[in-house]
Image (cartoon, rainbow, N blue to C red):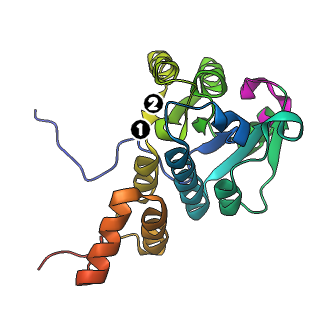
Amino acid sequence: MPILATPTPGPLLLTPTDHTLIMIDHQSQMAFATHSIDATNLRTNAALVAHAAAGFGVSTILTTVAEKSFSGPIFEEIKDAFPSAEVTDRTSMNTWEDANVIKRVNAIGKDRLVLAGLWTGVCIVGPALSALAQGFEVYFITDACGDVSVEAHERAVARMIQAGARPMTSLQYLLELQRDWARTETYEMTTGVAKKFGGAYGLGIIYAKTMFGASEGSHAA
């Protein structure tokens, strides 16, 4: 018997309500030594992720390391998305070894996690491997992460994939949460985030809307 296709999404696709986003150590001191991605792209991608999560109401944890004594404040673009959010500061390099962060993870109660932060090989590998070992599903947003070199970033990405974590990009995260342009309640928010932080794709939306009045959700006659 042939397999019958149905118009339903696969279970590995993310939805706004099925995961917790953890943004880790997007701080100035960590960014200074990040060379696998330039600082402008890094900040833009982190902003896209944060504003997507805020717009879709995703359960989100923001965390820093040694904010007052060494690493500095979290990126303003992230704070702009979550102006009243609690930011959990840590001393541990591995976020998963911080009791306060784990308390927040357990309070939210979701077993699917999405990670982004600096540096990939330390601040992301640590919680990714730790969460996987405890039975969580882990995704990570590669272009909202960065490391001291391309080599360091790529080895970290490979290590997490080998352990079972799933990579994605910042724009992919935004569009996966929307997934259907007929969802009018989030259409303007999604395209607004894309226009502001989505690079050339955002320019394309601006162009099409300005020149032709076109929108992503319209069908050709």
For this orientation, the residue located farthest to the right is: 69
Report the magenta residues as a range: 92-101
Secondary structure of the residue carrying tag 1 is loop
Residue 110: image x %, image y %?
64, 40
Q: Nearer the viewer, residue 123 or 34?
A: 34
Q: Nearer the viewer, residue 79 or 103?
A: 79
User: Which quadrant is home to the N terminus?
Assistant: top left
Q: Is residue 39 visible?
A: yes
Q: Is residue 194 left or right of residue 108?
A: left
Q: Which residue is mark 2?
A: 166
Q: Looking at the image, is mark 2 or mark 1 nearer the viewer?
A: 2
Residue at horizontal 75%, vertical 41%?
63
Q: Which residue is mark 1?
A: 12
Residue at horizontal 26%, vertical 79%?
214
Q: Kindly check if marks 2 and 1 are in contact, taking CB atoms under 8 A apart as contact.
A: yes
Q: Is residue 6 above or below residue 182?
A: above
| Residue 153 image label | none
Dot placed on the residue nearer the N-terminal end, 2 or 1: 1
Q: Amino acid at mark 1?
A: Leu
User: Which quadrant is home to the C terminus?
Assistant: bottom left
Q: Is residue 163 above or below residue 191?
A: above
Q: Inspect the magenta stretch and tell me whether residue 69 lies in it.
A: no
Residue 47: image x %, image y %?
57, 54
Residue 64: image x %, image y %?
77, 39
Residue at horizontal 42%, vertical 71%?
187
Label 2 crowding class (10 Å Cα cut-off): few <14, some 14-19, many 20+? some
